[in-house]
Amino acid sequence: MVTRRDLVVAVTVASATWAAVALAQSTAKPTMRSSNFAWDEMKAVPTATGEKRSVFSEPTTTLDQLAVHVTTVKPHERSHDPHRHWEEELIIVKEGTIESMQNGETVTLGPGSVIFEASNDLHGLKNVGDTPASYFVVKWFPPGSLQSAKE
């Protein structure tokens, strides 16, 4: 038999769950909708080796987060040392000459070239040309992956 105490506990738990869900939904970023981003409206922020333009970093309907930025590297510089990270990324060379290193192997690429960096592979980019080199970086974070990465 269901007692009055059982009902009070059930109602309390249900109310707390509802409140937690409502709070989580109210603090979550809204899902990014179809958008356009003009090059001349992207603010270039200077870095030690060039500059960076953040385009967006937002949740989408199918991803916890989709992030895009553009890095410009001065001649004969790297944006940073070779590194690894769990998320995958896609890099599209906009201009200049890039040396792409993946797991110790290098290849030289020019405008229009596409680079895929797999999860946890050692990778790095260097501008091997005599002019600035720019590339788009696209990173995606599948559902649950941001939380898993924090754990």
Image: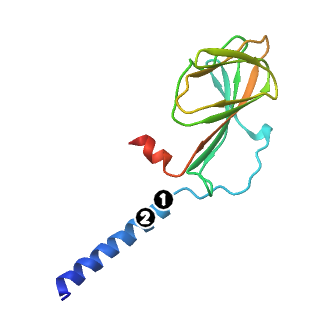
Q: Tell me the quarter of the picture where residue 56 sits.
A: top right
- Give x and y (percent) for residue 121: 55, 26
Q: Amino acid at mark 1?
A: Thr
Report the residue at 27% width, 76% height from top: 12
Q: Is residue 132 left or right of residue 1?
A: right
Q: How many marks?
A: 2
Residue 112 disc label:
none
Q: Secondary structure at mark 1?
A: helix
Q: Quadrant of the N terminus?
A: bottom left
Report the residue at 78% width, 27% height from top: 113
Report the residue at 64% width, 15% height from top: 105
Q: Residues within 10 Å of mark 1 (few under 14, many from 20)?
A: few
Q: Is residue 151 left or right of residue 139?
A: left
- Give x and y (percent) for residue 30: 59, 58
Q: Amino acid at mark 2?
A: Leu
In the picture shown, does residue 53 fall above or below 2? above
Residue 23 disc label:
2
According to the picture, the residue beneath numbered tag 1 turns out to be 27
Report the residue at 58% width, 48% height from top: 65
